[in-house]
Amino acid sequence: MRISVLTVLPGLFDCFLKEGIIGKAVQSEKVKVNVINIRDYAYDKHKVVDDVPYGGGPGMVLKPEPIFRAYDDISKKFGKPFVILTEPWGETFNQEMAVELSKKEHLLIICGRYEGVDERVKTIVDKEVSIGDYVLTGGELPAMVMMDAIIRLIPEVLGNKESLKADSFMDRGLLGYPNYTRPAEYRGLKVPEVLLSGHHKKIEEWRKRESLKRTLKKKPQVIENLLKEGKLTEEEKR
Ligand code: ADE
């Protein structure tokens, strides 16, 4: 998979693409990422990428030409991408969208600016995406949030394949179960006995029950929907 990013602040991606699981995925080329400075596609001598809005008003608007030129160049080099534009009023990003996007061969994320992008850019956009109902100064953090959620779904990016299955939201939207590690007791707080038992079947049952309990408490709507759709087994209903 390839992810191209168009931004006016490419430096923001440096640490993100070097560190941790994402850094390893990039190094081993399980994902190919190219972060492109929109400014490189501005053609005037001052490399201007934004301008005042027609009709007046506050703020600056990202100009269309550098974005279109970058898009043409990227398409020629790597094939036509599926294009996402970050927008505070876009469709809200979630796990389902991450799964869907992780199947694309080539994604292009255009990082919008808080003041806006020339509306004509939307003619090359497939999906406008928000990461939540709050306004950020730009689309770089939303781009990294989406990339993180997408890249970890690429086969073999996570060391332990089981960890994807245990993810919150991956099994019918049920939340994950509680986890503990050593020591077995700390400041009087004990790890549940069953986890120390080595009894795999009992541990599995306990985890399933805890996952259902947590979902019922924190996301009751998910359980209600599963009940309505008949997607809970008789045992789970108990
Ligand atoms: N740009 C500014 N705020 C945003 C948000 N919440 N999601 C996506 N893009 C944004």
Image (spheres, rainbow, N blue to C red):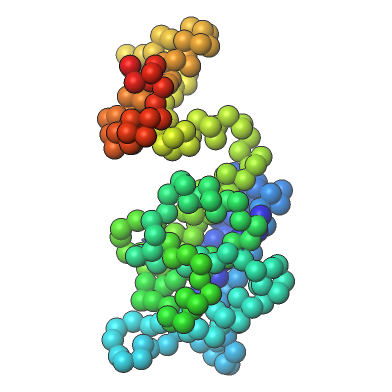
Q: Is residue 77 visible?
A: yes
Q: Is residue 86 left or right of residue 20?
A: left
- Image coordinates for residue 230, horizontal then vertical, percent: 38, 30
Which corner quadrant holds the N terminus?
bottom right
- Image coordinates for residue 141, horizontal then vertical, percent: 45, 59
Residue 80, quarter of the rendered image = bottom right
Residue 71, quarter of the rendered image = bottom right
What residue is at 54 percent from the left and 67 percent from the top? 83
Instruction: State the count of labels.
Output: 0
Tell me if residue 6 comes above or below residue 166 in the rendering: below
Between 170 and 176, which is closer to the camera in this rendering? 170
Q: Is residue 148 visible?
A: no
Q: Is residue 93 left or right of residue 84?
A: left
- Image coordinates for residue 66, horizontal then vertical, percent: 56, 83
Q: Is residue 15 left or right of residue 114?
A: right
- Image coordinates for residue 85, horizontal then vertical, percent: 47, 68
Between 107 and 33, which is closer to the camera in this rendering? 107
What residue is at 42 percent from the left and 87 percent from the top? 51
Tell me if residue 141 comes above or below residue 68 in the rendering: above
Tell me if residue 118 comes above or below residue 188 in the rendering: below
Tell me if residue 22 comes above or below residue 45 in the rendering: above
What residue is at 55 percent from the left and 70 percent from the top? 6
Residue 189, quarter of the rendered image = top left
Which corner quadrant holds the C terminus?
top left
